[in-house]
Amino acid sequence: MRLRTGSDVLELKQNHAVAVWFKAVRFHYVPPSFLPAILCSVMAWSSGYRPDILGFILVVAGVTINHFGLNMLDDVCDYMHAVDTCGSPDRNPYTGGSGVLTDGLLAPRQVAAGAAFCFFVTACIGVYLSLTHGWPVLALGLFGVFCSVFYTLPPIKFGYRGLGELALLVNFGPVIGLGAYYVQAATFDLQPLLMSAILGMMMWSMIVINEIPDYEEDKQGGKWNLVARHGRRTGIFLYAAGLAAAYLLLLGSVLSRSATPLALVGFASVPLAINSVIILKGNYLDRKKMSPANLAMIKVHLLTGLALIAAYAVL
């Protein structure tokens, strides 16, 4: 048996640290940031605008890093409000925060510092893009960062006041999408607004279904989101309504010729969406048994986003 050297131990510690921070940023929930950015950039290129590769890379990096900050700050605030508590045998792996704080893997000050660093990097990228591409980028960027910071941070913490779902719909749809499109095209257009709104509505559904397993904890911690306010059965309706609205918008956009007919490939995610609703309706009172529905929603958003990107990439 080979004895571990000092370098082996150091490497193990470094690998552990990377794994912990990867868990802290909850990367499986980050695609809703960069998918609308990629989609609307591709849409601009398909419309004949010359690709700004540096701008594209910075936009995708900026929204991704900003989402890292949002997830970590949300973790800290929920932990401080006792919304996220120690893990239990029936824990849903897709809700209740990242677990790095409740499991003692990181201290709140470390996660808060990580969030602050992410917002600082996002701000630097935003300033550069604003100087090189104009004030609309600055306006959209400021709005997005403001909503990210004060989603759970006092005194505003609108995620605790029943406004978080709407804010995330707007930010993870039109705000990111139109910002990315503007960087490439130096103008706005109806088509990227509609396509990004589809992903925003799916983000709405993703947030709502994640609130259902945390219903009791959110109420006890004073996090009065829509599910905590109106109950889990209403949450099922709001979840399904968000999905239905997204697909209806996609269909309406194509039928009105506001989107390419190829965008109908986005309906490839419908079977997953229907299955998630069925699982949710049958298991919404059992947080662990409903976890496949949470995973299915992640896949619905990812598949829809990739399908729409592919549709415009071939134009």
Image: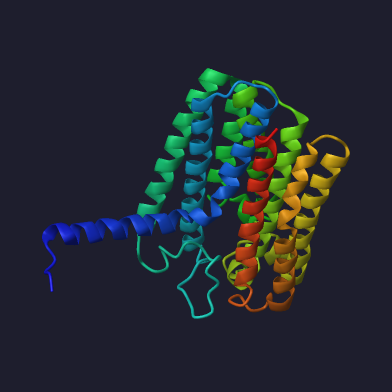
Q: Is residue 284 left or right of residue 31?
A: right
Instruction: Give the colour scheme of this rendering.
Output: rainbow
- Residue drawn at x 48%, y 56% as measured from the top left: 26
Does residue 84 show up? Answer: yes
Percent from the top left, x then y, of residue 216? 62, 73
Instruction: Pick whichever, 256 or 23, lies toward us.
Output: 256
Occupied quadrant, residue 197? top right
Percent from the top left, x then y, of residue 282? 72, 78
Total marks placed: 0
Percent from the top left, x then y, of residue 225? 66, 59
Does residue 107 show up? Answer: no
Spot the residue most to the bottom: 89
- Residue drawn at x 68%, y 50% as measured from the top left: 304
Occupied quadrant, residue 194? top right
Instruction: Pick whichever, 127 or 248, lies toward us.
Output: 248
As drawn, 33 above or below 52: below
As drawn, 233 above or below 9: below
Quadrant of the image containing the C terminus: top right
Instruction: Pick whichever, 149 or 307, lies toward us.
Output: 307
Percent from the top left, x then y, of residue 91? 53, 75
Quadrant of the image containing the N terminus: bottom left
- Residue drawn at x 34%, y 55% as measured from the top left: 18
Instruction: Pick whichever, 110 or 183, lies toward us.
Output: 183
Spot the residue most to the right: 256
